[in-house]
Image (cartoon, rainbow, N blue to C red):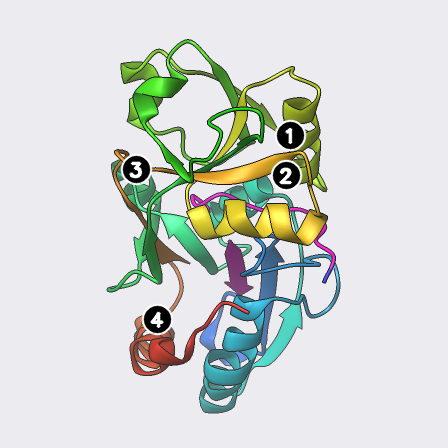
Amino acid sequence: MKSRGWVFLLTGVCFAVSQTASAASEAFLRVAAVSAPPHVTMSEVNPPEGALADFMMKYILPTVAEKFKLTVVWKGAPLKREFRDLEVGDLDMLFMVVKTPEREQKYHFSTEPLITEQPGMIVSKSQFKGRSAISVKELSGKTVGQMAGSLVPDFFKQNNINFITLTGQDVGVRLSTLVENKRIDGVFIHLVSVTDGVIAANKLEKLKSVALEDAPAFSTYVAYNKKLSPEIRAEIDRLIALHRKHYKIK
């Protein structure tokens, strides 16, 4: 399955749901996904592909749509725009978001995380030969790339790690190309499963995925627009808790 990009968790892989303002006209769930292989791929198609997209369409969205008499409409946007739309109420839910104090002021979060993992890096195979994990300290003084709008971890500054950001389609592939061309030293993603997915989906033969073994693990949550009804939030939280055991990466 060919990927057209990825996302950090933040976000962070992501889905978004939006509803109309009044309860009487709550007819739509407008849903978006940001590519984060293998969780979400082909995010511009309707609906997207990937393990998390399939999970949502099988276990979560149909039940919510039926219970609240809503029609699901898929809609894609760059990550930074999704965060903005979530804040102003054009979107009501964003999946796989890393929780921060700043974000907690803007959004509600699900009661339980979706995924908890060590972060990962995409690096050249000529670096760290024979190793599947490295220390954060080994990145001191180096420059890494990540997706614009994703959380910049505190240990970047603490370890003198420089970073650049890119936005738009195929950002994961474009950042990886910078690694291949030795313009940056690696690509940071909050979940090592996504660095694995970017390598596999795009057949980046000169690059590899490594875990950051001494970095704190990141948990990703569902972020809700604060205007989304408590009943819908509670139902989605209930369904995720009930069915999360069925979620498997392809």
| Residue type at numbered disc 2 | Gly
Viewer-nearest of discs 4 and 2 = 2
User: How many angstroms separate mark 4 from mark 2 (CA)?
Assistant: 31 Å
Any magenta on residue 6? yes
* Residue 54, quarter of picture: bottom right
Q: Is residue 9 left or right of residue 159?
A: right
Secondary structure, mark 2, is: helix
| Residue type at numbered disc 3 | Glu
User: How many angstroms separate mark 3 from mark 1 (CA)?
Assistant: 22 Å
User: How many angstroms separate mark 2 from mark 3 (CA)?
Assistant: 22 Å
Between 247 and 199, the residue placed more toward the observer is 199
Asked whether disc 3 touches disc 1, contact meaning CB atoms under 8 Å apart, the reply is no
Secondary structure, mark 3, is: loop
User: From this viewpoint, is residue 225 visible?
Assistant: no
Between 21 and 95, the residue placed more toward the observer is 95
Q: Tell which circle, 4 or 2, labels the residue nearer the N-terminal end.
A: 2
Which label belongs to residue 213?
3
Secondary structure, mark 4, is: helix
Chief secondary structure of the magenta span? Answer: loop
Which label belongs to residue 175?
1
Q: Tell which circle, 4 or 3, labels the residue nearer the N-terminal end.
A: 3
Which label belongs to residue 96?
none
Q: Is residue 136 left or right of residue 150?
A: left
Asked whether disc 2 touches disc 1, contact meaning CB atoms under 8 Å apart, the reply is yes
Viewer-nearest of discs 4 and 3 = 3
Residue 169 x %, y %: 72, 41
Residue 85 x %, y %: 54, 48
- Report the residue marked by disc 2: 172
